Image (cartoon, helix red, strand yellow):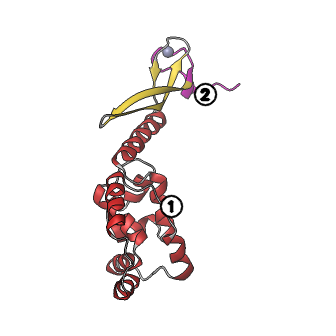
Amino acid sequence: MMTDSTDLCPICGEGRLQPKIGKNPVEYKSETTKLDLHFSLCDACGSEQADPDQTRANKRLMIAFKKRVDGLLAGGEVRVLREKLGLSQAEAARVFGGGQVAFSKYEHDDVAQSEAMDKLLRLAAEMPSAFDLLCRQAGLERVLAGERWQQAANWTAEPRRPTEVKRSVLRVVSSSRPTAGQQARYAA
Ligand SMILES: [Zn+2]
């Protein structure tokens, strides 16, 4: 087996680093869970250390957990939503804001999108007219239509927890059939 110098323990300079995955109990807003913890263990001096890749992986797991607790779209959900809207990451930043690399960071769980951004993304996925408007304001000529819009409309994510409560209340209130005028307005 080839000896890889990157496996050498930088602390004792003799041992080899063995990658390990432990369990990391974490707490956020009184919710607790155990996240995977990536690190390396030296087989000579026993020191534990995390290289930049492991540190990044651990950070992403923590941010993903916080997003879940906060009811925000997971990184993978942001990616699916963006792709179904037919946007590149750069186009999504033009349409929704956040800066040039925002969507790469959201989608990799490097950064949690703001609550406002989260709501905007969900709104765009639910309302073609809102998404069209945002695209036109961004100077994007592309407009979702026909089959592609159907795909986007079928997109579903976990509802935000606070919204979920409000929605069930709304359903009770709006149990009567919409009038023809309402239907025409909502279909417009
Ligand atoms: Zn060592």
Highlighted magenta segment, given as a residue range:
1-18
User: Local crowd at mark 2 within 10 Å, few (<14), some, or many (≥20)?
Assistant: few
Whether the magenta-drawn stretch holds residue 115 is answered as: no
Q: Residue furthest front?
A: 176
In-image side of 150 versus 107 (left or right): right
Residue at mark 1:
80
> Residue at 36% of width from left, 71% of height from top?
95
Q: Kindly identify which numbered label has been placed on residue 4.
A: 2
Whether the magenta-drawn stretch holds residue 5 is answered as: yes
Task: Name above or below for residue 36 compared with residue 81.
Answer: above
Lower sequence index among marks 1 and 2: 2
Q: Report helix, strand or loop for mark 2.
A: loop
Give the amino acid at mark 1.
Val
User: Local crowd at mark 1 within 10 Å, few (<14), some, or many (≥20)?
Assistant: some
Give the amino acid at mark 2.
Asp
Residue 169: percent from the left, percent from the top? 32, 60
Q: CA distance from mark 1 to mark 2?
A: 38 Å
Residue 154: percent from the left, percent from the top? 52, 68
Viewer-side residue, 43 vs 102: 102
Do we see residue 93 in this rendering?
no
Q: Residue furthest top?
A: 45
Q: Quadrant of the C terminus?
A: bottom left
